[in-house]
């Protein structure tokens, strides 16, 4: 492999998105190294890095040219229940690492979320003022604010929900349908899911182009979890009576605020890379593929 080809660093190679990105780059013949905080996973292609443990002193391998930062505390409830420890990782750790990497001449891609907005409007523009309503969203917004000034050395890629190929929730619904059991999806929670493979493709393109600024990736509309369940029931030819929706409040005290909208304006990915926002039903129905 020629020495002048980019070397990618996937920070958080054990994460859903980082793991898939690492495998895609590796299988595509790219030069890629990852990081892990699991000691037993460390090897020559996966370096140890704990964002809670002085990431400002962590030095990337010399050849790295692009880093994609996927590690962090990603569960809303974990951020809400321990804002201090989670912010140490999501804000202090991430921004110290980004500063460190940029100083070493690395182009940094930071993964962010629609949760940096309050959900009051659909299709938020990339440059809309940030308005987070959850602790997770506040931490992601603060990390964006801290790394934003690195200008041409960074890209921020915001995602709505990234849907893994076999999401456990959907699999549990399908299993219940096959047994003739009822399911209870939320009627007041929405999503605009992006299939994992597409999310990885978007990141790969931004990384290859080293294109700075803010990118957003979102499905073409929001649907409720109830609508997703009804669609799967239809596809599996089971009765709609098995779908018994509930409101989130009925499942107990729900953490923080529930966005009415999660969609993001994804036109920049379409303009620069020809990537159209995925159809929301495509993401849902892809779960049924073998
Ligand atoms: N998934 C989505 O729907 C979605 C949507 C929008 C934005 N994002 C953003 O995309 C990124 C990746 O999300 P994901 O869902 O793929 O993440 P994930 O599967 O939840 O994985 C998070 C990873 O971060 C690692 N981590 C946690 N604390 C760490 C620390 N102190 N030092 C080093 N690593 C640490 C975890 O390590 P262990 O595996 O060892 O616990 C885990 O592998 C995140 O920034 C997230 O905010 C995700």
Image (cartoon, rainbow, N blue to C red):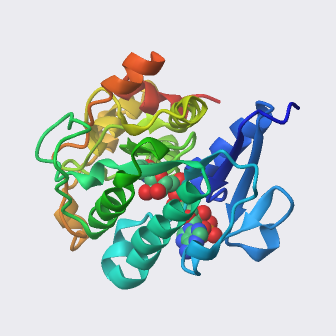
Left/right of residue 95 with respect to residue 126 in the rendered view: right
Left/right of residue 213 with respect to residue 21 in the rendered view: left
> How many numbered badges does the structure rendering display?
0
- Residue 65 on image: x %, y %: 66, 45
- Residue 207 on image: x %, y %: 57, 36
Q: Nearer the viewer, residue 163 or 1?
A: 1
Judge whether residue 182 can be spotted in this image. Answer: no
- Residue 129 on image: x %, y %: 16, 48
Left/right of residue 187 with respect to residue 12 in the rendered view: left
Q: Residue at x 40, y 25 (%)?
A: 269
Is 8 drawn above or below residue 222 in the view shown?
A: below
Is 135 drawn above or below residue 267 in the view shown?
A: below
- Residue 145 on image: x %, y %: 30, 58
Q: Residue at x 43, y 74 (%)?
A: 92
Is the C terminus in the top left, top right, bottom left or bottom right quadrant?
Answer: top right
Q: Nearer the viewer, residue 182 or 136?
A: 136
Is the N terminus in the top left, top right, bottom left or bottom right quadrant?
Answer: top right
Answer with the quarter of the image where residue 239 lies. top left
Q: Residue at x 36, y 62 (%)?
A: 143
Judge whether residue 13 can be spotted in this image. Answer: yes
Is 168 drawn above or below residue 155 in the view shown?
A: below
Q: Nearer the viewer, residue 65 or 189?
A: 65
Judged from this view, the residue extending furthest toward the left is: 120
Answer with the quarter of the image where residue 60 lies. bottom right
């Amino acid at each position: 492999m020629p020495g002048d080809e980019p070397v990618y660093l996937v920070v958080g190679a054990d994460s859903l998105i980082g793991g898939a990105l690492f495998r895609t780059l590796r299988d595509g013949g790219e030069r890629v190294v990852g990081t892990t905080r699991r000691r037993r996973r460390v090897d020559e292609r996966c370096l140890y890095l704990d964002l809670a443990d002085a990431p400002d002193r962590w030095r990337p391998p010399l050849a790295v040219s692009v880093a994609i930062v996927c590690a962090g505390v990603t569960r809303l409830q974990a951020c809400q229940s321990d804002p201090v420890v989670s912010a140490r990782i999501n804000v202090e750790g991430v921004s110290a690492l980004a500063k460190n990497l940029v100083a070493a001449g690395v182009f940094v891609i930071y993964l962010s979320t629609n949760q940096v907005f309050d959900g009051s409007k659909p299709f938020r523009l990339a440059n809309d003022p940030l308005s987070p309503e959850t602790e997770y969203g506040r931490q992601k917004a603060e990390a964006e604010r801290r790394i934003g000034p690195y200008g041409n050395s960074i890209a921020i890629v915001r995602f709505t929900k990234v849907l893994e190929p076999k999401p456990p929730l959907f699999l549990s619904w399908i299993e219940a349908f096959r047994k003739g059991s009822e399911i209870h999806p939320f009627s007041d929670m929405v999503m605009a899911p992006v299939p994992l493979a597409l999310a990885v493709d978007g990141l790969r393109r931004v990384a290859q182009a080293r294109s700075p600024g803010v990118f957003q990736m979102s499905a073409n509309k929001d649907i409720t979890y109830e609508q997703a369940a009804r669609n799967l029931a239809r596809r599996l030819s089971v009765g709609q009576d098995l779908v018994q929706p509930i409101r989130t409040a009925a499942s107990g005290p729900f953490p923080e605020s529930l966005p009415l909208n999660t969609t993001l304006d994804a036109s920049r990915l379409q303009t620069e890379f020809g990537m159209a926002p995925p159809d929301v039903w495509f993401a849902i129905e892809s779960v049924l593929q073998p």
